[in-house]
Image (cartoon, grey):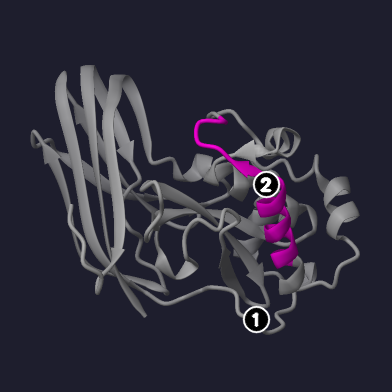
Amino acid sequence: MNRILVGSDLDFEVHSATTFLFQIAASQTDHQTILSEQFAIEPFTPYAECRIGLEGNRLHRITAGAGHLSIQYRAVVQRQSTQASGSYVPETDYAFLPPDALSYLNPSRYCESDLLSRFAFEEFGQMERGISRVQAVCDWVYEHLEYTPGSTGPTTTATDVLLQRVGVCRDFSHLMITLCRALGIPARYVSGYAVNLQPPDFHGFVEVYLNGRWYLFDATRLAPISGLARIGTGRDAADVALTTRTGNAMMTSMYVWAHLADEPWSV
């Protein structure tokens, strides 16, 4: 098990009353336990915590008036690894997939698996079904995309990324998810804090359902799977947006970090 220290500081200039939805708090799952945490707002503003979506992602809702707004989140989490092992793991036949995995086969906002099904089968359809095929998809995305910060935007889809061959972590993840779904393998998006990620930021991973459980993959290879502190899980990044706001406000700064508990660090 790994104990991970995570934190994020978000600052906004609010020009008129704005309602914010923040999805920056670590999640409590069968493989991740929150040992301690703190969610602070300056100036203090009442907030509500709720759970949304199929996976019950944690969300904080805040309505702030005009002025400066600072959000600070700190947590210590303990997690068990869900990294793919080197041993053979078969895919699950469609007829035996559990109901909660079925929705992760469908096309979604950023993952148009219906549009890329022919490409997916031409590239990977003849491979042995199982974890080795999923790893081949992950490797293909890593080898054929260039990681370039700022190269894509909020409307960029997996199809766009396949054509442009450039993107950031969410784009790498969206393309891998799309190709897996096109092959009939349930896949979903995971947002989180990532240990030793450079530059420090929130990170996007992929989770694939094989033989009765979910396995994590990182198509960017920028962070260790064992160093992920999960925030949320969804069909794609639209389900786990870190901040959503209705009103007139602008983010002025963001600082994010994650460290193993036994490593020296400072904030």
Give the magenta part as a residue range: 134-152
The circle drawn on residue 51 is none
Q: Which residue is mark 2?
A: 175
Q: Is residue 98 above or below residue 23?
A: below
Question: Viewer-proximal residue, 136 or 75?
Answer: 136
Other residues around mark 1 within 10 Å, as few (<14) / some (14–19) / many (≥20) = few
Image x and y of residue 206, in percent? 57, 57
Q: Is residue 179 above or below residue 249?
A: below
Residue drawn at 23 percent across, 60 percent down: 75
Residue drawn at 73 percent across, 39 percent down: 162
Q: Is residue 150 magenta?
A: yes
The residue under label 1 is which amino acid type? Gly
Q: Is residue 198 magenta?
A: no
Q: Which residue is mark 1?
A: 86
Image x and y of residue 132, in percent? 74, 72
Left or right for 192, reference 131: left
Q: Quadrant of the N terminus?
A: bottom left
Marks 1 and 2 in Cβ contact (< 8 Å)? no
Residue drawn at 69 percent across, 59 percent down: 139
Q: Quadrant of residue 84?
A: bottom right
Image x and y of residue 182, in percent? 78, 52
Image x and y of residue 114, in percent? 79, 43
Q: Mark 1 and mark 2: span between their CA atoms?
A: 23 Å
Under tag 2, what secondary structure?
A: helix
Q: Residue furthest left?
A: 43
